[in-house]
Image (cartoon, coloured by chain):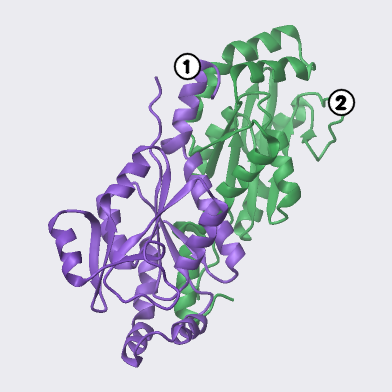
Chain colours: A purple, B green
Amino acid sequence: MPIKAKGLLIVVTGPSAVGKGTICRALLQEAPDIRFSVSVTTRPARPGEVHGVEYFFCSHREFEQKIKAGELLEWAEVYGNYYGTPRQYVEEVTNAGQSVILDIDMVGARAVRSQYPGAVSVFVIPPSMEALRQRILGRGTESDEAVQRRLAEAPKWIEEGLNYEYVVVNDDLTAAVGHLRSVVNAEMSRTARQGGALIRRLLEKGELD
Amino acid sequence: MPIKAKGLLIVVTGPSAVGKGTICRALLQEAPDIRFSVSVTTRPARPGEVHGVEYFFCSHREFEQKIKAGELLEWAEVYGNYYGTPRQYVEEVTNAGQSVILDIDMVGARAVRSQYPGAVSVFVIPPSMEALRQRILGRGTESDEAVQRRLAEAPKWIEEGLNYEYVVVNDDLTAAVGHLRSVVNAEMSRTARQGGALIRRLLEKGELD
């Protein structure tokens, strides 16, 4: 009896403010087969952000309790705030054969990839450094100091993209979402993932369903 | 100065009569960025096939001259006929940065992959063994003996698909073409192919164009 393939764990990351969250949410709206892992954070909610949608917001003290209880797949302190990924949700979804997408910063992405070498890693880049600069400035929710730090560190972060499997340019949103969808579809067709199971099922049962 | 990425060499194969040619031609109609490599063969043209479109048709003698002149990237004898891929076209197109798709049988695919380890390999499977049987019978252009041989050998060929990177099911044509397109897009986004060049260009020039 063929073993059901595990779902994909798709890690989407990129430099701060590149728009990876927007791409992931747009993909999820048109792809009901992909689930989204909501992160936990201690950073304050930005205007319009909803608890349980963009993030689970919690206090530093609550976050540290989650760390101690082993409830986080990865966590990191970035610019003075904690960010983490609840472990249970990701494991339940992928074990059930569904794919889950993680929209996380690069520190978290590194931690997840070291634990899940089979994770699909996608790095989002801006069409130009100037476009990234405008996005960082345009966000308007952070201190001047934080903005300057993000700008100064951008090239270093972008260079880290060379260690990721796939690069998606966030120029046109529709095109970027299409590329991310292609990556997910292609990975599902990989023989080492779903493809091998399909061939074995066809030879064993004579059909796929 | 960043080096322009080479185009992809995409090898599409699968068991006889699975419909890989139909999928490739449908993809090419909607993807003007992908070129198609037309094979040379000594097998007789089927009704409706046009010289230079489905194949370049030639005599056994002409084919053997091409072999001697080193003009073929790969060639094989299958069911008593020669099939081959002109070398020059594939090299010119990929060196110019364009991707080229090869719709070839599994014997030829093996030869190309051994020469081009970077080739993207896609294996097309039918939704069921019965569907494949109907397609082989329905073609109606071959001797009973050839049909029986194809049917008997189908499971062995399908098993070979486990050695290919991607598996695409030819159930619904539109879906199959979409999957093949996803594989091409995803491979173009791979850091080891276009993605790394994009990141280097962004860091060097500050923009992608």
Per the rendering, the mark at residue A56 is none
Residue that badge 1 annotates = A204
Residue A126: horizontal and vertical position, in percent?
50, 74
Q: Secondary structure at mark 2?
A: loop
Q: Residue at x 52, y 81 (%)?
A: A131
Q: In the figure, residue B132 lies in which quadrant?
A: top right
Q: Nearer the viewer, mark 2 or mark 1?
A: 1
Residue A12 position (above or below residue A2):
below
Between A29 and A171, the one nearer to me in the picture: A29
Q: Which amino acid, mark 1?
A: Glu
Report which residue position mark 2 lands on. Answer: B47
Q: Is residue A204 left or right of residue A82?
A: right
Residue B55 seen by the camera: yes
Q: Chain of mark 2?
A: B
Quadrant of the rendered image containing residue A29: bottom right
- How far apart in space, not on screen, are marks 2 and 1 (Cα)? 36 Å
